[in-house]
């Protein structure tokens, strides 16, 4: 019985570690970085997360990189002449007290030239660079196309 309890505790600890999706660099917290699984041989994908500035001075996400794609850019969606269009942005503002939500249909990290499909249940490393807080590598969880990412965030995205 002791072996069973010890084994169960180790399994619980390993599972908790595997699903940890919160990161911190400087005053910036990064909550649940995720990407949707890609369809077929799609050459583009996107990553999402919530950035929270726990400090008193503004910061900005200025770049991202990931080995899964040929290029990684910061993007937003804009309504132009009644059509939703995606546009690259130079940075994503992360103001104190107002989470910056990167989500489908809004701000996101664009993965251009995927080297292989993004498969649900897998993950990949992505390095985020902030103007003040510096650099951090996060693990991006790939989630099923039809499913949500498991978190509900209501704050409006900031730019």
Image (tube, rainbow, N blue to C red):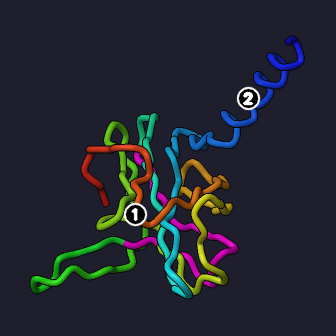
Q: Nearer the viewer, residue 8 or 112?
A: 8
**What residue is rendered at 63% in x and 84% in y?**
70
**Number of residues whose C-alpha sits closer than 10 Å to that of mark 1, classed few (under 14), some (14–19) or many (20 or more):** few
Q: Nearer the viewer, residue 24 or 38?
A: 38
**What residue is rendered at 45% in x and 34% in y?**
54
Furthest residue to the top?
2
* Magenta region, main secondary structure: strand
Which mark sits nearer the N-terminus, 1 or 2?
2
Furthest residue to the left?
82
**Number of residues whose C-alpha sits closer than 10 Å to that of mark 2, classed few (under 14), some (14–19) or many (20 or more):** few
**What residue is rendered at 69% in x and 42% in y?**
18
Q: Find the distance from the CA under tag 1 to the CA under tag 2.
A: 29 Å
The residue where tag 2 is placed is 13
Q: Nearer the viewer, residue 84 or 98?
A: 84
Asked whether, in this view, residue 50 is left or right of residue 34, the answer is: left
The quarter of the picture where the N terminus appears is: top right
Secondary structure beneath dot 1 equals loop
Q: State the image quarter where residue 76 is shown.
A: bottom left
Asked whether, in this view, residue 28 is left or right of residue 18, the answer is: left
Q: Nearer the viewer, residue 8 or 154?
A: 8
Q: What number is the disc on residue 146?
A: 1
Residue 120 x %, y % = 57, 63
Does 60 lie within the magenta span?
yes
Please provide the residue range marked out in magenta. Answer: 58-75
Asked whether, in this view, residue 67 is left or right of residue 33, the answer is: right
**What residue is rendered at 65% in x and 81% in y?**
116
* Viewer-nearest of discs 1 and 2: 1
């Amino acid at each position: 019985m002791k072996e069973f309890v010890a084994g169960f505790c180790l399994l619980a600890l390993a599972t908790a570690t595997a699903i940890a999706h919160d990161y911190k660099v400087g005053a910036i917290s990064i909550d649940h970085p995720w990407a949707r699984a890609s369809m077929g041989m799609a050459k583009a994908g996107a990553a999402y997360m919530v950035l929270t500035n726990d400090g008193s001075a503004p910061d900005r996400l200025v770049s991202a990189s990931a080995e899964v794609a040929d290029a990684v850019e910061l993007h937003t969606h804009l309504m132009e002449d009644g059509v939703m269009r995606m546009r690259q942005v130079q940075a994503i503002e992360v103001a104190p007290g107002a989470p910056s939500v990167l989500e489908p249909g809004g701000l996101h990290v664009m993965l251009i030239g995927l080297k292989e499909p993004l498969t649900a249940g897998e993950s990949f490393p992505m390095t985020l660079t902030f103007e003040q807080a510096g650099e951090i590598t996060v693990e991006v969880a790939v989630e099923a196309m039809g499913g949500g990412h498991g978190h509900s965030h209501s704050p409006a995205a900031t730019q």
